[in-house]
Amino acid sequence: QSVLTQPPSVSAAPGQRVTISCSGSISNIGSNYVSWYQQVPGTAPKLLIYDNNKRPSGIPDRFSGSKSGTSATLGITGLQTGDEADYYCGTWDISLRTVVFGGGTKLTVL
Amino acid sequence: QLQLQESGPGQVKPSETLSLTCTVSGDSISSSYYYWGWIRQPPGRGLEWIGKLLYGGSTFYNPPLKSRVTMSVDTSTNQFSLSLSSVTAADTAVYYCARLLRTDGDSPFDYWGQGALVTVSS
């Protein structure tokens, strides 16, 4: 059971918008920055969003992040078939003194 | 362009020690701005943080694994390593090495290796 809670799966049609939620507590999301990672099956995770809403160089602005209280959200607009992947949120937990991740959300582009 | 590459045995016997090395190219591992870390992913499951280290020797380990984990850095070869002792089948996973963007606890992992599958089996 992961410390951060994500929906197991989400789906949407090409061109549509989808959001993925990540729920935590005051000791993790409530106190620290959140990152989001994209993992295409069989490959390493790739940093998509960091510090709640910043995009690394090369990440298109179709990807966005936000945080409110003890929850964070990843948004993807203009869905493409290439966006099909698993998405993970992550942050630091000050009580557990460890990096914690969500269980991952599988995105299907119908 | 920074690149990380894991290397080590693909199979380890139960109760033995798992050892992996991460070779860093495109940047010096001696930079004081970055931590270097290990994350693992059991087949079909999510990500688990193992720990991180700074070139000067400071280390931070995931508490449940702390008694079995040792990380070290070799600046002469620009490599850092992971040792995990007394392994069981539950330690079977893809092991990733990664760079942390900064030294804060909530730093993101901005560069990842391709991963190395380690199977614990007799």
Image: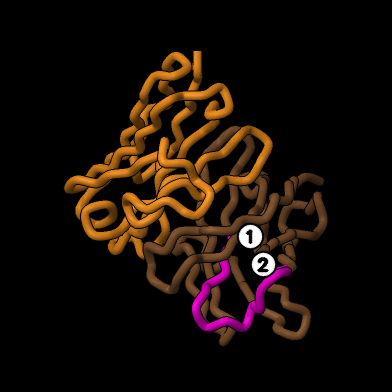
Badge 1 element? strand
Q: Which residue is mark 2?
A: B82
Q: Residues within 10 Å of mark 2 (few under 14, many from 20)?
A: many
Closest to the observer: A79 or A7? A79
The vertical placement of A93 against A39, above or below, is: below
In the rendered image, which residue does mark 1 sit on?
B97
Vertical arrangement, residue B35 with respect to residue B93, above or below: below
- Mark 1 and mark 2 residues within 8 Å of each other at the beta carbon: yes
In the depicted view, which residue is nearer to us: B46 or B67? Answer: B46
The chain letter under disc 2 is B
Which region shows up in magenta?
B24-38
Q: Colour of chain A?
A: orange
Q: Is residue A38 left or right of residue B84?
A: left
Amino acid type, label 1? Cys
Q: Callout 1: few (<14), some (14-19), or many (20+) C-alpha neighbours within 10 Å? A: many
The part of the image, by quadrant, that contains residue B21 is bottom right
Which chain comes out brown in the rendered image?
A: B
- Percent from the top left, x then y, of residue B106? 37, 62
Q: Is residue A33 above or below residue B55?
A: above
Q: Amino acid at mark 2?
A: Leu
